[in-house]
Amino acid sequence: MDCNRLKTRNQRKICKRIIIRGLLVLDTPTCLGSGDTDGNIDLQILRDSIEDKALLMGSSIAGALRNYLREYQNSDEFLLFGGLRTDEDGDQSPLIINDAISSEIIESELRDSVKIDSVTRTAADKAKYDLELLQAGTEFPLCFELLIEKGSDESSLLKGLAIALQGLEKGEISLGIKKHRGFGRCKVYEWQVWNFNLKDASDRIAWLTLDHSWSTDPPCTKSPAINPSIVAAMKEAGLEFPEEWEDQREFCKIDATFTLATPLLIRSGLASSDKAPDVVHLKSRRNEELKPVLSGTSLAGVLRHRVERIINTIGKNVNIVEDIFGSDLSKYKTSGAKASRLIVHESVIKNTTDLVQNRIAIDRFTGGTLHGALFNEQPIFPNSETYLKLNLELRNPEEHEIGLLLLLLKDLWTGDLPVGGTSSIGRGRLQGNKATITLRREQQNTTFTIVQSSGNLVISDAEYLEKFVSSLNEEVSE
């Protein structure tokens, strides 16, 4: 290529390269699906082709960060992440995000899932599937590289990157599938930032030899200190950007503490040993120990069924169900489907006891036992110290939708809405202890509390909360 053609090419004049590395740790099981349907599992983990380690694609990280930045500021995501595929004049993203491979060999757990018919309350035909999940505690080393071009808005780029990465740091960004059902929650605990000025010869050599310190003696690149805060790490690297950020998100969060009023059984397809009972409660690994959990998928299914029942009872506006919980994919197999706006987190149940119960089917005609129908179950039983925390979050809520969440909280609080299986024999009832409701609108937070104290229910500003329920009655009656 001659010199004249080089001069006329539209080349990017990069003056700075900023490299950021961090250690991502999964807080809940995560499904990074491979799309491979040839195995024995319906949704398998995406694996590295060389080692039996999990692969977290850079495109998955970029999509999650872009969506978070769009919700946080309602703008600026195009500057950092470039144009969309449909944009004819869209620019290329200046942010490079590498694929990440897990630090250790894959440790997975399997989850069985099934769709429940809302009318018969039984399993729908041909609607069972299983997931392969990465266990909580899996670590991924992350690497980002931001290219600063001559004449670009460096301050805005750094600000957008800091907002997005701080979302990872705070655990506000989830990865993988079923993010709105408690899977894929994660945090980044360690940050390192390198700032290379490519106009300086020593910085150019330092960038080229960053991962090859053996090529120079002594090494040109000195590793920065590990910092738990991404903003502090970027400031220590000499990067300047505004720290006053306007959070444009609107949401309604419910953080409630419950106890188990009765035993609970959420069926698990896998037992911990070959001598386990026929049916055991679902457990997930946390800090190298198996803990009983209330899965977000189970709780969301129960809540959706109760919402359908409430709407059908007081009115005819059934669109509210799909507006909150998303579209039923068995009905919408095209681009018309909508994702859920309600985030239901997975809850670990503390201080429980596992006990085995033997049961047998009774012949309805003879009144005696049915031959060959003996089975045993192992639900979890509560004690005086048993508790679990439920976390619900509704994005961009309307007033009538908040009223619907309050009715769901009331039904859970009083034990009228059981969760899990075998609810027909008295299992799965909860009892509320304390709830905090956080409503964020127009960049202002309003907090309400509900406390069960000595048989009395203490509610802060009950009249204000009652307005949301009244709004629901008006909405469904129109």
Image (cartoon, helix red, strand yellow):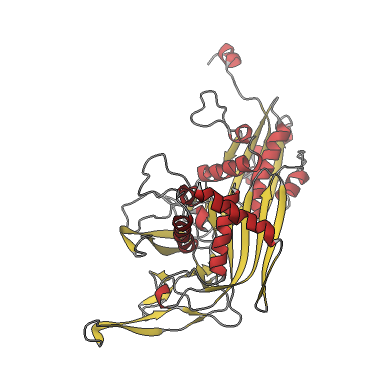
Residue occupying image coordinates x 46% and y 47%: 319
Residue ID at (67%, 39%) = 160
Residue 174 visible: no
**Residue 4 found in image quarter:** top right
Image: 336 above or below 253 = above
Instruction: Please identify the quarter of the rendering in which residue 308 is found.
Output: bottom left
- Residue farthest to the top? 4
Q: Position of residue 265 (x, y in %)?
A: 44, 74
State the residue in front, 474 or 90.
474
**In screen coordinates, is 358 left or right of 300?**
left
Q: Position of residue 304 (x, y in %)?
A: 46, 58
Identify the residue shown where x is 74% and y is 31%. 200
Residue 442 image point, x, y percent: 70, 44
Task: Provide residue 269's location: percent of width, then percent of height.
Answer: 38, 69
Q: Residue at x 58, y 32 (%)?
A: 82
* Residue 333, picture quadrant: top left
Q: Is residue 248 at least partly visible in the picture?
A: yes
In front of the other: 125 or 104:
125
